[in-house]
Image (cartoon, grey):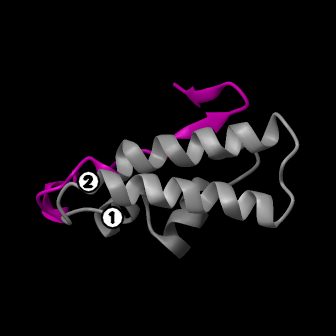
Amino acid sequence: MGWGAGQSRRRVALHYGDETAVVRIHSGNGPHAEMDQRAITCFDQALEDVALTDEPLRQVLHDYFAWATTTTMSAYHHSADDVPEGLNIPRWSWDGLQD
């Protein structure tokens, strides 16, 4: 997950929005831990539905989605206006979050 050496973060950000824009979309809705857990369960079921069940791929995809859902995407409960400009897109690898 994240961006490899050959991919253009700028090109993708211009087309889809940057990390700040994505986090803002998911912000300002109050705490929703139960909904987050349901989203993770649905994601896991979707992996099974499309037969992405081989390890370690399934676990890495689960870990990324669960991490993103419960950290960056749920960090600004009060208002999307609280999300700072210039957030970096997290980099994820087979070993988890990369610095």
User: Tag 1 or tag 2, which sits nearer the N-term?
Assistant: 1
* Residue in the picture at 36% in, 46% down: 72
Check the image and report above or below for 5 versus 40: above
- Residue situated furthest bottom in the rendering: 15
* Label 1 CA crowd tier, 10 Å (few <14, some 14–19, many 20+): some
Left or right, residue 94 beside residue 78: right
Residue in the foreground of this view, choosing between 57 and 46: 46
Q: Are marks 2 and 1 in contact (CB under 8 Å)?
A: no
**Count of marks, rendered view:** 2
* Residue in the picture at 68% in, 60% down: 45
Q: Is residue 75 magenta?
A: yes
Residue in the foreground of this view, choosing between 97 and 70: 70
- Residue 23 in picture, x, y percent from top left: 35, 58
Where residue 15 sits, quadrant-wise, is: bottom right
State the SS at label 2. loop
Q: CA distance from mark 2 to mark 1?
A: 15 Å
- Residue 84 in picture, x, y percent from top left: 22, 50
* Residue in the picture at 39% in, 44% down: 70
Residue 26 got which mark? 1
Query: Which region is colored magenta?
Result: 74-99
Majority secondary structure in the magenta region: loop
- Residue 20 in picture, x, y percent from top left: 34, 57
Check the image and report above or below for 80 versus 64: below
Where residue 46 sits, quadrant-wise, is: bottom right
Type of residue at label 2?
Answer: Glu
State the SS at label 1. loop
Which residue is under mark 2? 85
Type of residue at label 1?
Answer: His
Where residue 79 sits, quadrant-wise, is: bottom left
Q: Quadrant of the N terminus?
A: top right
Check the image and report above or below for 9 versus 50: above
Left or right, residue 3 beside residue 19: right
